[in-house]
Amino acid sequence: MSDLKPKVLVIGASGALGKAVCDVFSARHWNVLRDLRTPDGQPDSVYVDLEDEQSVAEAMAGVDIVVNTVPLNYTAERIALTTGAKLLSLAITEMSAQQGLRNQYLKASGTVVLNAGLAPGVTNLVVNDLVAHDRYWKGRITIAVPLPWNGYRGAEGIRLVHANFTTSGRHGAYSGSHDAVVISFPEPIGDTECIGWSERNDGWVQRLAAGRMVRAYCYIDNRRLNSWIVRLNKRDILGRLPLWPFLRFQRRFDAPTEEPVSIWVSLKTPEFEHSRIITCTGWYLSSAKAAEVMAAQLLNSEHLAGRGCLDSNEAFTLAELAGPLQECGIVVHDHLPEIGIHRAVPAYAGRPAAGWAPGLGERDRWSGTDTPR
């Protein structure tokens, strides 16, 4: 490997997202080190066990940047903060864990950027751009993301999907089902039924919410499977499913898939509604490309050295990354009149959650439980 190229350590390199990250960074002329619990003897593999802090520290020594795709115990993040390293985390980071890292390492010598990549990541930059127009903090943030039928069929992807589908709490109230809406996306996706997603994390834009209402939705890009999931949700069954039916869909892919991806991000206030559409090809592939753009910016920006724990929207802006993102196929479009929430879908078959008010509109129906945070 050439010493002239920047060196990146990819943690979680054996997973679907990790493999995509390795491929994209290699194509963009980085020296890539792959973490493996059992090194395969290749010159680009290095032993890392996230339960063994010393192995993580040794692997991180001498690299220019670390990309972590594994949401486990934050060992690498803590080492980066105390050793002056730079790290990007592509996993959804819960608010409590993020705040714990911030409080524990107030005078950190390193920089850790959480919620990086595509979603979280680019979506956070778009939300940050939109909330700049909301001077009175009255807006409602809405995010709708795809769950690629092929892209999320690795073991960890399936576990993430199951964990969010079977959440037992929503917007502060108990419920066995999720909100449901129909959203009009650009073709070839079109009108699609979506259900609530990542409710307990405020759709991974916790710090940006700042008291605003957040609604995050998802859809599966296989229409037949998406329709099945929506029906299970309406019947109050989805939230009670065990993991094993999901694992039956597990499949291993040799290369990242290239399905069309559309992500809708909106901010609605009593005065206006602004929204953006993020389009790209391949969920994991585009997540890896977005990570490479952010890694290059983090590596080359002196003002980001020794900044401690940051969210992606605190480290980067949409304006500075829009050009490089577009060059790699991730495009942020302004609002199109025909794109957005088309109609609400009743989502309840059993006992409604506390705060439900029959007959009220989408905006008001959760007034009993949506309290500013």
Image (cartoon, helix red, strand yellow):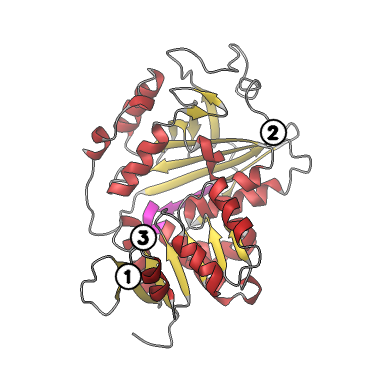
Of badges 2 and 3, nearer the viewer stands 3
Q: Secondary structure at mark 2?
A: loop
Q: Classify residue 319 as left or right of residue 136.
A: left
Magenta span of residues: 277-286
| Disc 1 crowd, CA 10 A, few/some/many (<14, 14-19, 20+) | many
The quadrant in which the C terminus is found is: top right
Of badges 3 and 1, nearer the viewer stands 3
Amino acid type, callout 1: Arg
Q: Which residue is mark 2?
A: 372
Q: Between disc 3 and disc 1, whose residue precedes?
A: 1
Give the residue drawn at x 44%, y 37%: 218
Q: Which residue is mark 1?
A: 34
Tell me where residue 147 appears, x and y as whole percent.
38, 42
Q: Is residue 184 above or below residue 343?
A: below
Amino acid type, callout 3: Glu
As measured in the structure, the alpha-carbon distance from the residue carrying label 2 to the one carrying label 3 is 38 Å
Q: Secondary structure at mark 3?
A: loop
Residue 301 seen in the figure: yes
Give the residue drawn at x 35%, y 68%: 22
Q: Is residue 236 above or below residue 9?
A: above
* Dot label at residue 51: 3
* Dot label at residue 210: none
Residue 181 seen in the figure: no
